Amino acid sequence: MLKGIPKILSPELLKVLCEMGHSDRIVIADGNFPVETVGRHAIVIRCDGHGVPELLQAILQLFPLDTYVEHPVSLMEVMPDDPVETPIWDTYKQIISEADARGAAAVGTIERFRFYEEARSAYAIVATGESALYANIMLQKGVVTD
């Protein structure tokens, strides 16, 4: 065991976060995301018993967001005419505001199918049990300066 490490972060996930370099991306996927298909060439980490917000909060305690891009955090856009509400995005923005001075300004959206394409080049994809729709989030790693 280690001190100061959120218990939700498994040794496998900690290793991946450490291995990632500047501009590498990680997807924290909801329960409907095709993790194994999209992540065929990525490291897939199973965290099925957890939701995205709790993992996001834990990861951002250790993971700097990229300061060289406008939106180091990307959300999957809701499809036009899809009546889905996304209150979980407000939760994400609050968590991000606690970890990054840009707050909600660090967050952008990507059209659904483009999100899948971007995710195919992610370093890792974390599969969660999140039941909220359009709850997928992609983080781009920044430089550790401490």
Image (tube, rainbow, N blue to C red):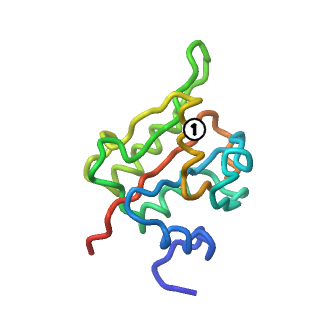
Q: Amino acid at mark 1?
A: Glu
* Position of the C terminus by quadrant: bottom left
Residue at horizontal 58 percent and vertical 73 percent from the top? 7
Query: In this image, 22 relative to 27: left or right?
Result: left
Percent position (x, y) of residue 120? Answer: 60, 46
Image quarter of residue 44: bottom right
Q: Residues within 10 Å of mark 1 (few under 14, many from 20)?
A: few
72 over 78 or under it: above or below:
below
Residue found at the far top of this picture: 81
Residue at horizontal 55 percent and vertical 69 percent from the top? 16
The one nearer the camera, 38 or 93, is 38
* Position of the N terminus by quadrant: bottom right
Q: Which residue is mark 1?
A: 117
Residue at horizontal 73 percent and vertical 45 percent from the top? 37
Query: In this image, 85 relative to 103: left or right?
Result: right
Percent position (x, y) of residue 129? Answer: 71, 50
Percent position (x, y) of residue 82? Answer: 61, 17
